[in-house]
Amino acid sequence: MKRFVVALMSLCLLSFSILAQTERTTRPRVITAPTPREDSSSEPKLKRPPVMIGDTKTSSPTATPTTPSGEVVEEDNEVIKVETNLVTFPVSVLDRDGRFITGLKKEDFQIFENGVEQQIDSFATVEQPFTVILMIDVSPSTAFRIDEIHEAAVTFVDQLRRDDKVIVISFDEKFRVLSPATNNRSVLQNAIRRAEFGDGTSLYDAVDNVINRELSRIEGRKAVVLFTDGVDTTSRRADYQSTVRATEEIDALFYPIRYDTSVEMANRNGGTNYPQRRRGGSGDIVADILAGILGGGNVQIGGGSAGGSREDYEKGKRYLEELARNSGGRKFEANNDLSAAFSGIAEELRRQYSLGYYPETVGQKGERKKIRVRVKRPNLVVRAKDSYIVGTTEKKLAGK
């Protein structure tokens, strides 16, 4: 009996235990969600940048920036240039004895545009290497002086420093790049010697090619040394006015070296006309000259238009003077001491100041504006271009 009671009590306890386990597994557990509160703190809720839809570990979100006027932005490795109105140009300062003055500061200069003083916004004085384009006229009229021109060009190259570069170009009716930019003196001398006697004179076309094609590829300081008599006979694309105007739109200096070949050309024709080349003739220069004289007509040897007169040579002289003046360079006569002239050109290119400003009045595209640079010190001479054309080319700071 006693055993029966114990067994019955054990069975009851087991039943209660099973019932409790059943309720624990079947009754849902209720979790009270906390009542949301507004964040009263001033700190941002996000502690890291948000991930955009479609983002992966290897991609990054792209935003469209707001670009202030006149700035440069980079997007996907592509540089977008926003045009500005900064006008820059090189300036040389000399004393009355022709010595170049260094050590001037921005405060020593004044810039005037159409008579109104402008604020100087960029200024540089660092001596940097430069690139010079040698243009060699190999037309018939310079044939008498071609050896002299070769020697002068080689002399100029010898005046430069080792880190200065030179491009050699020859022209007659055609335009030839005899050497790309290099500082290898041997290569340059060989290129100069290859500038051989040709046919016709497309001077204006050659200058146009240099301005619009060659100079645009050169970064930093740059100049053009032009060996010619200034007479054009066969240009078809460019002319006197278009090329002179183009020099106002660039930051390169022109240094024409003028060879007066009028006497030689007059002697070739018996004294009055200054003949130029045309196609045809016997191919023998002496025979063609004699045929022209005996026939009583103008002598025309090779390509080009009829007879070059004294007026043509005077026009050529004016043309070279305008190229130099409008670009801020200088014209030299080949009859003078060219060695001293070349030394001066090389020194001038190395000792220039670069000035720039944003015009108070932008002006209309194509408008010519007069500029004047003044130094606030006595007995100094300033050499710089005196005008520019608005909005026709991108203005870049020389030496940058």
Image (tube, helix red, strand yellow):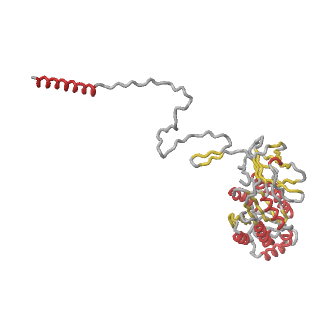
Query: Quadrant location of the N terminus?
Result: top left
Picture coordinates of residue 391 (x, y %)?
73, 46
Does residue 67 lie above or below 266 as drawn?
Answer: above
| Residue at x 72%, y 51% (from the top left corner) | 396
Instruction: Say whether residue 132 is left or right of residue 382.
Output: left
Residue 236 visible somewhere in the drawing: no
Between 141 and 251, the one nearer to me in the picture: 251
| Residue 101, image x, y percentages | 84, 56
Front position in the image: 323 or 343: 343
Residue 252 versus residue 340 in the image, above or below: above
Residue at image coords 80%, 48%: 106
Residue 176 placement: quadrant? bottom right
- Farthest residue toward the left? 1
Rendered location of residue 352, percent (x, y): 79, 56
Residue at point 65%, 47% (across, down): 81
Q: Identify the residue at image location x=88%, y=53%.
A: 380
